[in-house]
């Protein structure tokens, strides 16, 4: 099976390529060789390579950046996705599209399922991902759409690495304590992908997150426990934090379709996070004399 992974140099793309490379024929799509905003280049690529499947990871995902750069965000997240979906439809290529929990308004009080209505996202990133979903469903109604949430797993540029680096420096940590979602290990997502790649009868929207939900404060508290750090942890309300883009208060997802089909292999967030830390980070023990408060 020949698979194009768009955005292969991004955090999720790198993990997916690494996980699938030994089992499938992977073409790593980058801005240089598979620019999703360059329709001519994409057409030439699809004509030349004849992909069986596209795993579409390429997107702008920095929520604050997207809010400040809406035209660029729309061009990549919406028009770029339309270009991919259109070519998949023309070539009969199966599409697996990575979406987001931020397509929802965040006004719910119980976990969102695949049947719940999207819309009303408080930030432009979420709106762009909602529009991208519409493009995928318009051109590739038999595609697979995977909604994911609060990703970590590359030991860099994510919440887990930020907390651990602060602890290593003996610094106090201040985090928001009133926004709920599902922390999700990118390696768990990559490990579940063969289910969709090898079962072509599976289609439609699936939520693909680690089981359970928490807020950033409780997640940071759990990380510090795993690394045996006692640096001060301070919880703050999102209402008191200056930020460019508003995050939803509640964007918890439920893996309902996977559970209904008996196919859910996603572990709970605490087990997955503790295993990730044990594999990738040494224990850190900080003392009062080392703290920089």
Image (cartoon, helix red, strand yellow):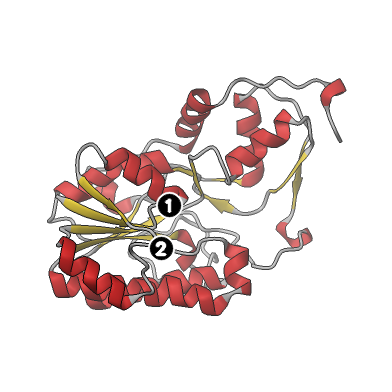
Q: Residue at x 74, y 25 (%)?
A: 230
In this figure, which residue is indicated by the disc labeled 2?
Answer: 31
Residue 292 at what x, y percent from top left? 85, 33
In this figure, which residue is indicated by the disc labeled 1?
Answer: 9
Residue 175 at what x, y percent from top left? 71, 47
Q: Nearer the viewer, residue 63 or 46?
A: 46
Tag 1 secondary structure: loop
* In the depicted structure, whether residue 223 falls above or below residue 65: above
Locate the C terminus and report the quarter of the image it occupies: top right
- Find residue 32 and report its image quarter: bottom left
**Would residue 228 be found to the left or right of residue 123 on screen?**
right
Residue 281 at what x, y percent from top left? 56, 26
Q: Nearer the viewer, residue 54 or 43?
A: 43
Say which label, 1 or 2, has the lower sequence index. Answer: 1
The disc placed on residue 65 is none
Residue 192 at what x, y percent from top left? 29, 42
Inspect this view and state whether residue 284 appears. Answer: yes
Q: Residue at x 71, y 19 (%)?
A: 285
């Amino acid at each position: 099976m020949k698979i194009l992974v768009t955005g292969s140099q991004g955090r999720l793309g790198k993990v997916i390529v690494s996980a699938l490379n030994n089992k499938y024929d992977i073409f790593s799509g980058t801005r240089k060789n598979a620019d999703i905003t360059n329709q001519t280049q994409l057409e030439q690529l699809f004509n030349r390579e004849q992909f069986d499947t596209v795993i579409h990871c390429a997107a702008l995902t920095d929520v604050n950046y997207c809010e400040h750069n809406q035209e660029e965000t729309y061009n990549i997240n919406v028009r770029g996705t339309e270009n991919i979906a259109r070519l998949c439809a023309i070539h009969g290529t199966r599409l697996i599209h990575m979406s987001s929990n931020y397509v929802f308004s965040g006004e719910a009080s119980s976990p969102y399922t695949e049947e719940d209505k999207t819309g009303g996202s408080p930030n432009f990133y979420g709106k762009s991902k909602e529009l991208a979903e519409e493009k995928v469903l318009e051109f590739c109604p038999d595609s697979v759409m995977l909604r994911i949430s609060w990703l970590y797993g590359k030991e860099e540029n994510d919440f887990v690495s930020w907390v651990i680096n602060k602890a290593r420096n003996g610094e106090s940590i201040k985090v928001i304590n009133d926004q709920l979602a599902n922390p999700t290990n990118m390696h768990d997502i990559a490990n579940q992908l063969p289910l969709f790649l090898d079962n072509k009868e599976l289609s439609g929207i699936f939520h693909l997150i680690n089981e359970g939900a928490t807020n950033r404060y409780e997640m940071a508290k759990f990380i510090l426990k795993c690394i045996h750090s006692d640096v001060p942890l301070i919880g703050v309300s999102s209402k008191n934090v200056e930020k460019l883009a508003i995050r939803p208060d509640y964007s918890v997802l439920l893996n309902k379709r996977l559970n209904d089909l008996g196919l859910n292999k996603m572990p709970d967030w605490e087990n997955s996070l503790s295993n990730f830390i044990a594999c990738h980070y040494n224990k850190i023990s900080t003392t009062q004399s080392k703290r920089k408060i």
